[in-house]
C-alpha cells in the first residue's frame, strides 16, 4: 500500500491514541478531531511554527518508518527526522556500506549518471527537443564519470527546459526554480527514508562527499529520479495561471503527490515511494556483493 504524505501548514496539536495520529486544529471545538492510522503515513511535512507534536507522535511515526520534514520560516524544508531503527540488520549493512571499495563506488556512480542522462533525454524528446548530442553521452559514461558527462548533459538539459522562462537553474534563481527546489526536497526525503529503511547511512555517499551535507547518499541516489520531478513541475507550470514566484499552498499540495507518482523499474509499474524501496534495496545488494546493478526508474512520458 502506498504510504500517505501529510502536510501541516496551520497551527495544530498532534497526539497519538489507539495507533491513530490525532489532529486538533487551533480554534476548532474539542470534538473536532481528525485521525489517521499511523501505519498509513510515509511522509509528514511540518510547515508552521505553531505545530505541537507530543513525544509519542514522533516515536510512533519513526517506529512506522515515516520521515518528518521540518520547514523553516521561508516554508522550505531545512531538516528531516529519519527512523534509524527501521532495519533489523542495520549495523551489518552499514559495515558493508562503509567497506565499499572505490572501484565499486565508481561503477555505481556510472550507473547513476547513465540512468539520469537517459531520463533527461527521454523527457527532452517528449517535449519535442532533439537529443542526438545527449544520447551519445549515455553510451560514453565511464566508471566514476571522469569526463563529467553528468554536468555536460545537465547544461544542455536545463538550457532547453528553462529557455522560455529566461532564467537559469539554481537554488536562488527565479521562475520555476522554487518549484523544482521544493519538489527535490520532497524527493530527497523519500529517498533518505528508504535508504535508512534498507540499512544505509545517508551521509556516506558514493560520489557526493560534502562534509556539510548529511544526505550525500540520498543526493546520489535521487539523481535519476530528478527528471520525474522536473516533468511534474513543467506540466504544472503549463497549467498555472498566477505569475507569483512565491510558493503557494496550492503549489505545495501539487508537489506533495511526488511519492505517489507512477514510475517504471524493469517494466514493473509502482508508486515512486515503493519504487524507491527497490532502488535502495538493490543498492544494499551491490554493497553486499550479491548484485551488480542498481535498479533505477525509467521516466514515463
Image (cartoon, helix red, strand yellow):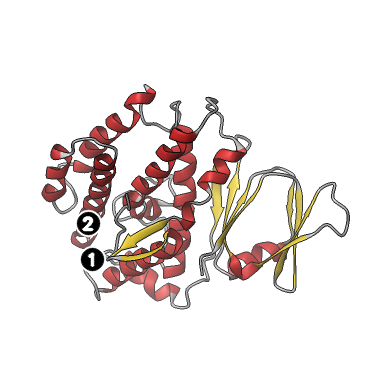
Q: In the rendered structure, find residue 293 and report the number of the disc placed on it.
A: 1
Whether label 2 touches label 1, CB < 8 Å: yes
Q: Position of residue 257 (x, y in %)?
A: 51, 51
| Point 21% across, 36% down: residue | 152
Can you tell which quarter of the image residue 61 is in?
bottom right
Which of these two is toward me, 214 or 118? 118
Q: Is residue 279 left or right of residue 26?
A: left
| Position in image of residue 103 (x %, y %) | 18, 60
Dot 1 lies on which element? loop
Q: Earlier in the sequence, mark 2 or mark 1?
A: 2
Near-viewer residue (98 or 239): 239
Q: Which mark is residue 270?
A: none
Residue 217: % across, % down: 37, 55
Quadrant location of residue 126? top left
The residue that mark 2 highlights is 111
Q: Is residue 33 above or below residue 96?
A: above
Give the residue drawn at x 45%, y 51%: 187
Nearest the eye: 291 or 164: 164
Q: Is residue 209 above or below residue 18?
A: above
Q: Residue at x 47, y 51 (%)?
A: 258
Tell me the residue at 61%/70% (across/down): 39
The correct choice, above or below, for 172 with respect to 8 in the image is above
Amino acid at each position: 500500500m502506498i504510504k500517505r504524505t501529510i502536510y501541516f501548514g496551520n497551527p495544530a496539536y498532534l497526539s497519538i491514541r489507539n495507533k491513530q495520529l490525532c489532529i486538533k486544529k487551533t480554534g476548532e471545538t474539542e470534538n473536532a478531531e481528525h485521525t489517521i492510522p499511523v501505519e498509513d503515513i510515509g511522509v509528514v511535512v511540518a510547515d508552521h511554527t505553531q505545530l505541537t507534536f507530543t513525544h509519542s507522535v514522533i516515536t510512533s511515526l519513526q517506529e512506522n518508518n515515516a520521515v518528518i520534514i521540518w520547514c523553516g520560516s521561508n516554508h522550505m524544508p531545512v531538516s528531516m527526522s529519519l527512523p534509524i531503527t527501521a532495519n533489523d540488520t542495520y549495523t551489518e549493512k552499514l559495515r558493508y556500506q562503509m567497506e565499499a571499495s572505490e572501484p565499486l563506488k565508481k561503477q555505481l556512480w556510472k550507473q547513476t549518471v547513465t540512468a539520469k542522462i537517459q531520463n533527461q533525454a527521454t523527457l527532452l524528446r517528449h517535449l519535442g527537443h532533439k537529443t542526438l548530442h545527449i544520447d551519445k553521452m549515455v553510451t560514453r559514461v565511464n566508471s566514476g564519470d571522469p569526463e563529467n558527462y553528468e554536468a555536460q548533459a545537465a547544461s544542455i538539459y536545463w538550457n532547453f527546459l528553462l529557455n522560455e522562462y529566461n532564467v537559469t537553474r539554481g537554488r536562488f534563481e527565479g521562475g520555476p526554480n522554487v518549484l523544482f527546489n521544493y519538489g527535490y526536497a520532497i524527493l530527497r526525503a523519500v529517498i533518505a527514508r528508504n535508504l535508512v529503511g534498507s540499512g544505509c547511512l545517508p551521509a556516506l555517499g558514493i560520489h557526493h562527499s560534502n562534509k556539510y551535507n548529511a544526505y550525500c547518499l540520498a543526493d546520489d541516489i535521487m539523481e535519476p529520479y530528478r527528471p520525474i520531478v522536473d516533468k511534474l513541475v513543467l506540466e504544472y507550470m503549463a497549467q498555472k495561471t498566477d505569475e507569483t514566484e512565491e510558493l503557494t499552498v496550492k503549489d505545495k499540495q501539487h508537489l506533495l503527490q511526488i511519492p505517489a507518482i507512477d514510475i517504471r523499474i524493469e517494466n514493473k509499474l509502482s508508486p515512486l515511494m515503493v519504487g524507491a524501496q527497490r532502488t535502495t534495496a538493490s543498492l544494499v545488494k551491490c554493497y553486499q556483493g550479491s548484485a551488480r546493478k542498481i535498479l533505477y526508474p525509467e521516466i514515463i512520458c
